[in-house]
Image (cartoon, rainbow, N blue to C red):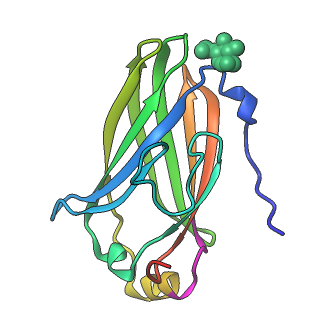
């Protein structure tokens, strides 16, 4: 049994921010690595309720760790209140080692809107020995995503990563 600690509750998402699509592409080749949609025929893996699930496991190939930069496209809808200073701070760890922190300012979103933004992640240079350990240790690479509106935490999502190939 795994205990996951979240720094806020699902009820703190008072703006009803709801994710409808998440896409990852390799910036160098343009190849799409992952495309998760909440609705629609191309829904993949076991990821169904993107907005209510706060925890997700990703299966990537070892080659993922050799990429230089990826673009992550996020599509989301907003409830009846505008979002001011919507911001995402993401921390990636291998075990207790902090790999990198990302800080993305999404900005202002109007009420009842559907928004798309792409964030560029320059992947950190990781020691080859650590990369080998990451590949050999599925789901010991983790991330925390903190979403803020007006400096207040409204969502905390967690992810775990395997780099041993798709299931
Ligand atoms: C969020 O959804 C709830 C339930 O549907 C609704 O009562 C509330 O007014 C919504 N809030 C916003 C900001 O859209």
Residue at x 39%, y 41% (from the top left corner): 74
In x, y percent, where is residue 148?
56, 30
Q: Is residue 9 above or below residue 56?
A: above
Furthest toward the left, the residue is: 29
Residue 140: within the magenta?
yes
Q: Quadrant of the N terminus?
A: bottom right
Q: Is residue 129 left or right of residue 1?
A: left
Residue at x 36%, y 51% (from the top left corner): 23
How many marks the image carries: the answer is 0
In x, y percent, where is residue 166?
45, 78
Q: Is residue 80 left or right of residue 29?
A: right
Bounds of the magenta segment: 136-142
Residue at x 63%, y 30% (from the top left corner): 154
In x, y percent, where is residue 35?
37, 55
Name the quadrant containing residue 116.
top left
The answer to which of 95 and 31 lies nearer the viewer is 31
Furthest toward the front, the residue is: 41
Name the quadrant containing residue 98.
bottom right
Q: Is residue 134 above or below residue 5?
A: below
Residue 110: within the magenta?
no
Furthest toward the right, the residue is: 1
């Amino acid at each position: 049994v795994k205990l996951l600690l979240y720094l806020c509750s699902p009820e703190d998402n008072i703006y009803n921010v709801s994710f409808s699509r998440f896409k990852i592409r390799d910036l160098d080749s343009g190849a799409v690595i992952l495309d998760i949609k909440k609705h629609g025929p191309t829904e993949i893996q076991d990821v169904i309720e993107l907005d209510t699930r706060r925890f997700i496991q990703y299966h990537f190939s070892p080659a993922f760790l050799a990429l230089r930069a990826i673009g992550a496209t996020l599509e989301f809808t907003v409830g009846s209140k505008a979002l001011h200073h919507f911001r995402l701070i993401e921390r990636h760890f291998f075990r207790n080692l902090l790999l990198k922190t990302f800080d993305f300012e999404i900005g202002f979103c109007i009420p009842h809107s559907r928004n798309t933004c792409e964030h560029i992640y320059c992947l950190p240079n990781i020691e080859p020995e650590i990369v080998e350990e990451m590949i050999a240790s599925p789901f010991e690479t983790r991330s925390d995503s903190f979403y803020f509106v007006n400096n207040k935490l409204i969502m905390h999502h967690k992810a775990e990563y395997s780099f041993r190939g798709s299931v």
